[in-house]
Amino acid sequence: MTRATPQVLIVGAGPTGLTLACDLARRGVALRIVDAAPGPFVGSRGKGLQPRTLEVLEDLGVLDAVLAAGNAYPRLRIHWRRFVVGHWTLVPHGTATPDVPHPSTWLVPQARTEGILRDHLESLGHAVEFGTALTDFTQDDSGVTATLTRDGASEIVRAEYLVGCDGGHSRVRKSLGVGFHGETHEAERMVVGDVRVDGLDRDHWHVWPFARGGAVALCPLPGTDRFQLLLNVKPGTPLPELTEAALHQRLQDAARPGAKLRLHDASWLSVFRPNVRMVDRYRVGRVLLAGDAAHVHPPAGGQGLNTGVQDAYNLGWKLGHVLEGAAPALLDTYEAERLPIAASVLGLSGKLHQKLRQGGMRPQRRGAETQQLGLHYRGGPLALQSEGDTSRLRAGDRAPDAPCVDAMGHPSRLFDAFRGPHWTLLAFGPQHEDAPAWARSRFGDAVHAFHLRTGGNSRDVGTLLDAGGHAHQAYDVSTGALVLVRPDGYVGHVSRPGSREALEHFLAPLLPARVRAGQAVGFLP
């Protein structure tokens, strides 16, 4: 049978696929999202949400639910046999600043994050089709023809684009013949699972780093009565049976006699072998890859899930624009921007994993380098900087937040201005007071423009009062500037003191056809 044509077919309903689906759905894109699994994932696997990911989830409208479902990481409690020998802060708790509202990594079981995204997607009118496998696909110049199988019955689906978010063993990637280069550490194994443990407090992440056969760790999972079990298996040591009895014995061996601990009621167990791999291409024609289908990481540093979410957030607005008539070459920038990021993050994950292998707790401490706030697209195809501009904030950087006051006198934030599927123009300096009206006349609702001033009053809806000067400081503005923020919260163009002609030349070809009708300028080839 054949159904109505979706514009985008998403294969894989993990965090990456769900993020992409939510972003496309709010743009009005017709989509289907399928997953071969019979039902939702139930484990805690990727439990650490980095600050940049929290910003993405805020933009999508699910941050409050995510924060309510988790908590900041607890301190490590280090055990030697049945004795507590120390404490250590593995994941520091940050303090919010005007430009970084979410400074701490947030602990949420992956299954809960996925559930929140699924609920949000359903509120937008779409549901994951579980038990539906992609078995084949072909593509031509106008779209992709895919074969889906469910309960033994096949369905032919025609879509304009297909996105493989189907994990490290991606069928989409393998069918494309895209290289997946790197290595698998076959000798290194880790048992990961969700278990109940009697006799441990839930205020700490308990670690037995010197346990015979490999370190044992138990991290309390918020919103549950379970711990995530991490059990390293040293090279040459037999892999324990994935039974509660065998895993309980490993815990008892680590704690030694006298420790009144009982591990039981495992709800999810898996054996993990560290992989460091990435693709050499993110796109082949009308088929794209994202998340673990494009890169797989060691668990150290909590980078894998977060990098996949960022892939989806980068791709969503570009697909949405192209489907509305923007230049198809815009999709080339997805690979150009995300492939170097994946390589950089894989390098960080590999270094953290190497420190983990070498033993000791202090070298593993995670800080700003894992939070993904400093990742940037400087020098990329969508980062246009005024020639000779040496200011601190550059095109391609993450756009900072800042508190401000709107035209009605209500407290607001720049992130409030950014929220939604649109571009945002920030105009600084008295010479750009009319920039909001100019932007409306040129770009309509595709660009939300604001004039930021440090004093005075205005009832213009396009005015934001930066009374504390935080926005001017974060954007490194002393006189005048035009700063164009992309739909994914990165700075696309910076012009000081501000050239509207340069901004329009940059932006016009990136916008949907309805906005740029009649405009002949071009930035992308």
Image (spheres, rainbow, N blue to C red):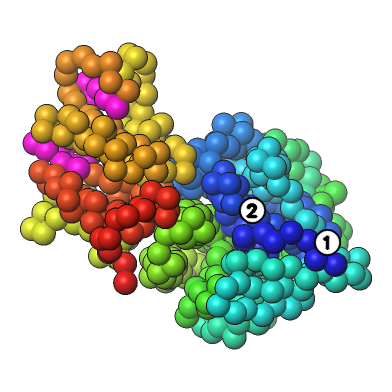
Q: Nearer the viewer, residue 358 or 282?
A: 282
SS class of the residue under badge 1?
loop
Single out the mark in the foreground, 2 or 1.
Answer: 2
State left or right for residue 220 relative to residue 502. right
Based on the picture, tell me whether residue 25 belongs to the magenta stretch.
no
State left or right for residue 351 relative to residue 79. left
Q: Earlier in the sequence, mark 2 or mark 1?
A: 2
Q: Are marks 2 and 1 in contact (CB under 8 Å)?
A: no
SS class of the residue under badge 2?
loop
Please tell me how crowded label 1 is: few (under 14), some (14-19), or many (20+) other residues with Cα within 10 Å.
some
Q: Distance from label 2 to label 1 (Cα)?
A: 21 Å
For image coordinates 66% across by 80% down, the residue present is: 138
> Which span of residues is magenta-colored?
462-482
- Where is residue 347 shown, x and y percent of the image? 42, 70
Q: Is residue 486 above or below residue 457?
A: below
State left or right for residue 250 relative to residue 399. right
- Where is residue 250 shown, x and y percent of the image? 75, 61
Q: Is residue 471 visible?
A: no
Q: Is residue 185 above or below residue 13?
A: below
For image coordinates 20% across by 43% down, the residue present is: 482
- Where is residue 212 shown, x and y percent of the image? 66, 66
Based on the picture, tell me whether residue 466 belongs to the magenta stretch.
yes
Q: Nearer the viewer, residue 370 or 93?
A: 370
Residue 6, label in figure: none
Residue 131, label in figure: 1
Please tell me how crowded label 2 is: few (under 14), some (14-19), or many (20+) other residues with Cα within 10 Å.
some
- Where is residue 237 shown, x and y percent of the image? 70, 76
Looking at the rendered structure, the kind of residue marked 1 is Gly
Quarter of the image where the N terminus is located? bottom right
**Label 2 sits on residue:** 30
For image coordinates 48% across by 78% down, the residue present is: 281
Quarter of the image where the C terminus is located? bottom left
